[in-house]
Amino acid sequence: MTSAALRIEDVAPDFEAETQLGHFKFSEYAQGSWVVFFSHPRDFTPVCTTELARAAQLQPEFAKRGVKMLAVSCDDVESHRGWIPDVDAYGHTKVQYPIVADADRRVARMYNMLPAEQSGAPMPVTVRSVFFIDDQRRIRAMITYPPAVGRNFDEILRVVDALQTSTRLGVATPVDWRRGDEVIVPLAVSDEKVKQNFPSGLQVVDLPSQKPYLRTGKYAG
């Protein structure tokens, strides 16, 4: 059985483990930074190889945003070390973030990264979970895919941008939002904050209800 389901705004559980880079304590790694924590079913598997390579390619972009990357896979450290050259070769890149060794599924259970258990089935491997964790170690968003479906790391980067923008400005982001696009400004945002963050003013969308709740603006900076 897994632990109680984690929810948005929960503090991300702390843990210690081994990685291909050495001994690891999550709370020390995460201190003062955002973290994107993502799970992989097994080493030497095709979808995981493509994902880890893409994550390594995008690591500089995440670093610009103050985000550290962290992976976990259901194999031991020596397996990780043997697998990483394949990932590097596939992506023409270099994996520099830690990959947690979790052969006993301890971390996977802690973070609810396992599928529903079936009687008589072998020890399960993880689904493809992503946890977006802020610099206070709060879980701000979660995405989960089945093992057969590879993740879109451009979308993961987009979610980071949306979370950080909404946190900084007290705003929301509309459908298909990308960094630099207009944002939604809730009615609760003060006039002073609007003047400070939206020098060009706001646009109120004309809706049949005539309610002025959908306000958009281009933020400064």
Image (tube, rainbow, N blue to C red):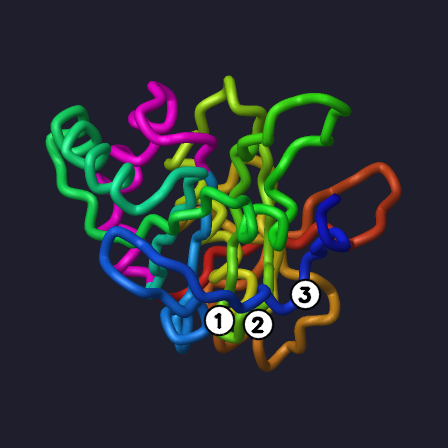
Span colored in magenta = 40-65
Task: State yes or no: discs 2 and 1 in contact (Cβ < 8 Å).
Answer: yes
Q: Quadrant of residue 185?
A: bottom right
Residue located beneath label 1 in the image: 197
Query: What residue type is disc 1 on?
Result: Asn
Residue located beneath label 3 in the image: 10
Q: Nearer the viewer, mark 3 or mark 1?
A: 3
Label 1, secondary structure: give it: helix
- Residue displayed at 44% across by 42% down: 156
Q: Position of residue 203 (x, y in %)?
A: 61, 53
Q: Position of residue 87 (x, y in %)?
A: 21, 31
* C-alpha gap between disc 2 and disc 1: 5 Å
Residue located beneath label 2 in the image: 194
- In the depicted structure, whether residue 6 falls above or below residue 72: below
Q: Main secondary structure of the magenta part?
A: helix
Q: Is residue 178 visible?
A: no
Label 2 crowd bin: few (<14), some (14–19), many (20+), radius 10 Å: some
Query: What residue type is disc 3 on?
Result: Asp
Q: Position of residue 20 (x, y in %)?
A: 25, 51
Q: Quadrant for the N terminus, please.
A: top right
- In the depicted structure, whether residue 115 falls above or below residue 109: above
Task: State yes or no: discs 3 and 1 in contact (Cβ < 8 Å).
Answer: no
Query: What residue type is disc 2 on?
Result: Val
- In the depicted structure, whether residue 155 falls above or below residue 16: above
Label 3, secondary structure: give it: loop
- Residue displayed at 68% across by 65% down: 10
* C-alpha gap between disc 2 and disc 3: 30 Å
